[in-house]
Image (tube, rainbow, N blue to C red):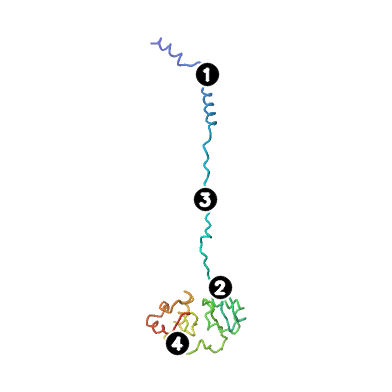
Amino acid sequence: MNTWLQRIIPWLTPTPRETVGVSVLLAGALIATLWLWMEREPPPLHTPVVVAPVDTHLQMPNVTRETTVTVHVSGAVATPGLVSVPAGSRVDDAIMQLGGLAKDADVGRVNLARVLTDGEHVHIPVRGEPSRPSELSAAPSEETPLDLNHADVTALIQLPGVGQVKAEAIVEYRDTNGPFTHPGELRNVTGIGETTYQRLAPLVAVR
């Protein structure tokens, strides 16, 4: 047995020269593999697809909106006359465009916070000025109904069953929600129930 092992061991134990030879062969194989890998053709590049942006401005409908309103302001203002202001402006905005209030203006009779409507007439009375015919004309009737969108507190008080509190509530509702679109909206005003509305319906209008 020992004789057999003695014959095999020399074959299993390489000499220094054999070790160097094997290392050279392995290095050559590695270099050849790297060279072949570098020489192969690169994979084709994918051309990116360019999508043109959509011009959304061309797809939007052309919407025309009223941007200004023109009103006539008379009475105790610096320069009475016509004035154009941005839509949604209030009485005070129109007055300021005309130079402001005169010193003797009786602003207690005008709601400066009311939203303006195109084509209306706003009159600023002076202190001691008698009420205008439009304010103290005969009580509203079916022949001459009161316009809910232009009547001030003084005019609204003429309506039967509408005192100072309800008149101010009507003006406040109009200022908050915009002009009335139909007389039936009076039902939405605080203090005006169905019974009161039925009494007022023939006497009011929306213009």
Q: Could you tell me how far apart the alpha carbons at marks 1 and 3 are, in whole angstroms? A: 61 Å
Q: Could you tell me how far apart the alpha carbons at marks 4 and 1 are, in whole angstroms? A: 124 Å
Residue at the disc numbered 2: 68
Residue at the disc numbered 4: 143
Q: Could you tell me how far apart the alpha carbons at marks 2 and 3 are, in whole angstroms? A: 42 Å
Q: Could you tell me how far apart the alpha carbons at marks 2 and 4 are, in whole angstroms? A: 32 Å
Which of discs 2 and 3 lies nearer the camera? The answer is 3
Q: Nearer the viewer, residue 38 or 131?
A: 38
Amino acid identity at mark 4: Glu
Q: Nearer the viewer, residue 129 or 50?
A: 50
Furthest residue toward left: 195
Which of discs 2 and 4 lies nearer the camera? The answer is 4
- Which quadrant would residue 99 be assigned to in this image? bottom right
* Position of 6 relative to 83 (above/below): above
Q: Whole-percent x and y of residue 203? A: 43, 85
Amino acid identity at mark 3: Val
Residue at the disc numbered 1: 21
Amino acid identity at mark 2: Thr
Q: Nearer the viewer, residue 152 or 13?
A: 152
Mark closest to the chain's N terminus, 2 or 4: 2
| Disc marking residue 156 | none
Amino acid identity at mark 1: Gly
Q: Residues within 10 Å of mark 4 (few under 14, many from 20)?
A: few
**Tag 1 secondary structure:** helix
For the point 52% across and 80% down, which residue is it?
A: 111
